[in-house]
Amino acid sequence: MSLRTLYRRYRNPLTSTDGHILYYNWWNKQPADEIWFTNFLQKRGFLERYPKTRFVFFSSLGNLNLFRLDTIIHPCPHNRKRLYFNGENNHYPGFAPYLHNLIDHKSTNLSLGFDYTDDPRYMRFPLWILEMFPPESTEQDIRRICDQLSHQKWDASSRSRFCALVSGNRGPNDPGAQRRTRLVESLNSIATVDCAGKLLHNTDELKTKYNDNKAEFLKQYKFYICPENASVDGYVTEKVFHAIGSGCIPIYWGANGNPEPDMLNLDAILFWNPDGDNNALLKQIAELQNNPAHYREFYEQPRLRDDAWQVVANYFNNLEQHLNALFKS
C-alpha cells in the first residue's frame, strides 16, 4: 500500500455524527452511529463527561499501519483514547500483526478481545456480547434476555424441519468448508440438511421467503450447524448464541470443546469432533430426531447457567470501569 493510499484511508475513517468516535479497519456494513461501542459510550455518558475526547477504535480487518500512522500524527494526545477490539481469531496466520491485541504497543489505551490475557490494558470482551445484548441494556434487561434464551418451550407445530446450515465458506481447500461439508454429509444419513448459504447451497428460502432474516428462517428447524472457523481457547463468536436465540439445538465445534463455560449449559449443546469418532453423536441426533419425547426433554433443559446474567452484567460494568480508568492516569 502506497503512503498516499494509506493516508487517504486514514483521513476517511468511519466517524460518528458528533465527530467524537472514529473507527479504523472496521466492518463497513453499518454507519459509525450504529456501531455497538458508539451507543455504549453515548448511553453511559462518556461523551458528556469528556466532551474534548476522541475515542479512536481499531480492529484487525485492515492494515496495521493505520494505527502506527495515528501514533505518529498524534504522538502525545491527552484527549485521544486508542482502543482495539478484536472480533476475529488473531491466532490465525492472516492476523499475525494483531496477535497480541495491540497491547504490545504502548499507545494502546485499552484492548478488547476473546483471549484470556493478563494485562492492565486488556479486558476480555467476546464478540457475542455485541450480537446478543444491546449497548443500552440495564441489569434488568440482561436478566430478561438471558431468561428468554435459557428457558424455551418446545412447539412441535412450528419446528418441523430437521437441520440447517448457513455458511459462506467456499473453496475446496478451505478448512472450515471441509469440516462443515463432512458434518453435513454425516447428518444427511439421518435426514436432509437444508443449506441456505453459499456452501452446499440447496435452498433459496432464506432469501425468497424470509428476506435474509436468519433468525426467522431458523425457527422452523430442530438443529443448527454452528461450528467456529477455528478451535482456540476462549474464541467464541455469535454462532452458538444465534442457534440458541433461534431456538435450535446447536451442533457445535470450537473453543476446544469448552465454549463460555461460565455462561452456557454445555449439556444443552451437541459437540462435533471433526478429527474423531462421531458415531455416538450421530446416534444421539437420530434418536432426538425420531423420538419427540426425548427431543422435548433435551430441548427444554436450561440453555444458560443460572448466573449467566451476572456474567454479562459484569462485562458491561467492567467495560465502563476500564473506560473510566483511562481518564485517571
Image (tube, rainbow, N blue to C red):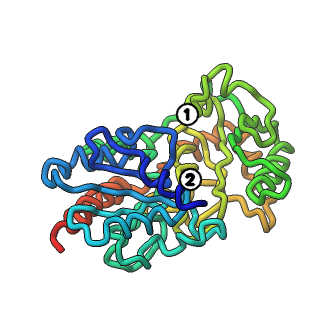
- Residue 253, compared with residue 201, is above or below; it is below
Q: Which amino acid type corresponds to the residue marked 2 in the rendered image?
A: Ala
Residue 5 x %, y % = 55, 54
Q: Residue at x 75, y 39 (%)?
A: 198
- Residue 145, compared with residue 230, is above or below; it is above
Which residue in the protein does label 1 denote?
215
Location of residue 17 (image quadrant): top left
The answer to which of 216 and 34 lies nearer the viewer is: 34
Residue 76 x %, y % = 26, 72
Residue 141 x %, y % = 29, 42
Q: Residue at x 35, y 55 (%)?
A: 312
Q: Which amino acid type corresponds to the residue marked 1 in the rendered image?
A: Ala
Location of residue 83 (image quadrant): bottom left
What secondary structure is marked by label 2?
Answer: helix
Q: Residue at x 42, y 45 (%)?
A: 14
Residue count near mark 1 (Cα–Cα under 10 Å), binned few <14, some 14–19, many ≥20: some
Quadrant location of the N terminus? bottom right
How far apart marks 1 and 2 lie (CA) works out to 19 Å
Residue count near mark 2 (Cα–Cα under 10 Å), binned few <14, some 14–19, many ≥20: some
The answer to which of 27 and 264 lies nearer the viewer is: 27
**Horizontal arrangement in the rendering, residue 251 relative to residue 116 (left or right):** right
Which residue in the protein does label 2 denote?
268
Q: Which mark is residue 254?
A: none
**Horizontal arrangement in the rendering, residue 49 relative to residue 289 (left or right):** left
The answer to which of 118 and 325 lies nearer the viewer is: 325
**Horizontal arrangement in the rendering, residue 270 relative to residue 131 (left or right):** right
> Contact, CB < 8 Å: mark 1 with mark 2?
no
First in sequence, mark 1 or 2: give its number. 1
Q: Residue at x 60, y 72 (%)?
A: 96
What secondary structure is marked by label 1?
Answer: helix
Can I make out residue 20 in this image? Answer: yes
Residue 57 x %, y % = 38, 57
